[in-house]
Image (cartoon, rainbow, N blue to C red):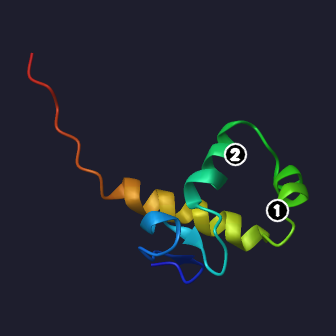
Amino acid sequence: MNKRITIDPKIMVGKPVIKGTRITVELILELLAQGQTYKEIFADYPHLTQEDIRAAIAYAHEIISHEKVFPLSS
């Protein structure tokens, strides 16, 4: 697990967050998916770092890389 990402049931109902914040990995990915740049994200969340955003992306990659896909039979 990435040292910048924490999961605590008492914080944001256990969603993965950037350590020391209530900013979820989900929010960061959503902002990036909407086309926001790092600069725009930093303007809204100035305490975030590039490493925090990279950690959120890496966390999502780690989760998805373990996803099992089962082909549908025809």
- Residue 32, label in figure: 2
Q: Earlier in the sequence, mark 2 or mark 1?
A: 2
Say which element carries label 2.
helix
- Residue 24, label in figure: none
Residue drawn 47% across the image and 58% down it: 61
In this rendering, position of residue 60 left or right of residue 39: left
Question: Could you tell me if residue 31 is visible in this image?
Answer: yes
Q: Is residue 22 above or below residue 29?
A: below
Give the mark count: 2
Closer to the camera in the image, 11 or 65: 11
Say which element carries label 1.
loop
Closer to the camera in the image, 68 or 9: 9
**Position in image of residue 24 (x %, y %):** 59, 61
Point out the frontmost of discs 2 and 1. 1
Q: Which residue is mark 1?
A: 45
In this rendering, position of residue 39 left or right of residue 26: right
**Position in image of residue 72 (x %, y %):** 14, 26
The quarter of the picture where the C terminus appears is top left
